[in-house]
Amino acid sequence: MSRARADEEEYWHSSKFRAFTFDDEDDELSQLKESKRAVNSLRDIVDDDDDDDDLERVSWSGEPVGSISWSIKETASSSTSSLEGQDSSLQKGSSSYAAFPKQVSSYSLSSLFKGRNRLPSFQSLSNALSDTGVKNYAPELRRPKAEYKDYSSDWSPKDTVKRMQRGKVCSLERFRSLQDKLVLLDEAVAGHDGNVITAVLIFLKRTLRREILFRELEVRQVALCHLIHFLKETGEQKLLLDLLRFLDRTEEVALSQYREHLNIQDVEKRREFLKGCIGLPFSAEDTSHIQDHYTLLERQIIIEANDRHLETAGQSEIFRKYPRKASILNMPLVTTLFYSCFYHYTEAEGTFSSPTNLKKTFKIPDKQYVLTALAARAKLRAWDDVDALLTTKNWLGYTKKKAPIGFHRVVEILQRNNAPVQVLQEYVRLVEDVETRLNLATKYKCHDVVIETYRDLKDRIQLTAYKCKVERGSAEEQNINSILNNTQIRWKN
């Protein structure tokens, strides 16, 4: 009995803290304040009572309430049922209180700053509004992992693709192995979303060697087509050519190189570039087009230099009357033909600027030539040239009008260029389809053609109705009356 009493007195003398009295010295009070500052300033988050402004509450174990060590012990004691039944008696032969079991790794750093069973007077505002039993005595150093779900890097390739389809921000850097990257690409292709496929391809293009990327895309045609289109759109010509060469698409390589002429502004450099493109491995048809392109640009350079000189010197009447609005350089073939028909229509075939020379050199079809030349000469109101263009001779020397584009189109072109009614009527009469002829004649007020057509159709009713559409007392009205009074005509109605 006496030994137990002696141990008990030894415990009380060896305790870290003594019961509070008004005789405590100032150094002990300063130690309590230092412990409070070490944890964090509780004054910012705890509703302090007037009595607790300068003092820290002390647990029975001697640790300040809210300290890290107190939190660990309190959390461990509440989670370990075997310790809940223990009393506060000392182990035999020990001078300190009972030790607690070592904490497992499931505790987060933030849990070290949490305690339980606080006194009501020491409750914070945030805890008063919460129903949970866990009370915060200091700010957390980090948020729970669940709150960082949108920034996690643990998604599978399928989940990553789904998030990208929904417009979520995703980091693809976690996919480091080749296998993971290919699975990610396959999932993107399976999702049928072009934006996601392109985004994954950009990532692979940046993180894989070209040889590996090309080899894997060769068996993934959908992704390959996306990459080729992307490289064309972004102008990454070197990578595109390397890819096409790897795939042995020689014709596409040639076409891609040919497209480079669009980026050359200097006309002489462009001409030399096109000359070098002629030897590239194009198909037979494309080779012919490249040759024509080079020849046309060479021809345009000659025409431009000569016409600029004539326009500046003022030696040509047509350039004085109709100044050029733009240069002929780099214009399409049809535009060049129109220009030639407008400014150089009467030149001999031996000159480079002659329309017939262009027609022969570039094998322009008759329909295209007649359509372009007719538009150019009608714009100049050169009706004699229009007539000559549409007149042909047969082997007996007889002449007749012929229009490869159809006379109904001839009438429309002439009318757009304000051709006189006499000129229009001549070509409206040549329209073979009766209904089309009547529609055009009525639309453009070619009265003589309408009257002649109804006469030939022996349609008395329509002719009589049309009499109301002409001016009273005009030559057209007299002509209608003369036809209606002709007893030689056997009318159908």
Image: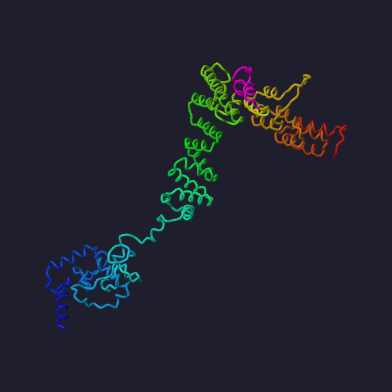
Q: Which residue is more in the foreground, 440 or 170?
A: 170
Q: Position of residue 346 (x, y in %)?
A: 63, 19
Residue 473: in sight, yes or no? Answer: no
Q: Residue at x 55, y 16 (%)?
A: 315
Q: Is residue 307 magenta?
A: no
Q: Which residues are magenta?
A: 340-364
Q: Which residue is more in the foreground, 175 or 121?
A: 175
Which quadrant of the view contains residue 435? Answer: top right
Residue 142: in sight, yes or no? Answer: yes
- Figure quadrant of the C terminus: top right
Judge whether 180 appears above or below 246 on screen: below
Q: In the shown orientation, is residue 451 left or right of residue 444?
A: right
Q: Position of residue 2 (x, y in %)?
A: 14, 82
Q: Residue at x 16, y 77 (%)?
A: 7
Q: Which residue is more in the foreground, 218 or 323?
A: 218
Q: Position of residue 135 (x, y in %)?
A: 31, 69
Q: Residue at x 70, y 27 (%)?
A: 423
Q: Which residue is more in the foreground, 437 or 474?
A: 437
Which quadrant of the view contains residue 414? Answer: top right
Q: Is residue 359 magenta?
A: yes
Judge whether 289 appears above or below 215 on screen: above
Q: In the shown orientation, is residue 149 left or right of residue 63?
A: right
Q: Position of residue 215 (x, y in %)?
A: 50, 42
- Figure quadrant of the N terminus: bottom left
Judge whether 455 appears above or below 47 on screen: above
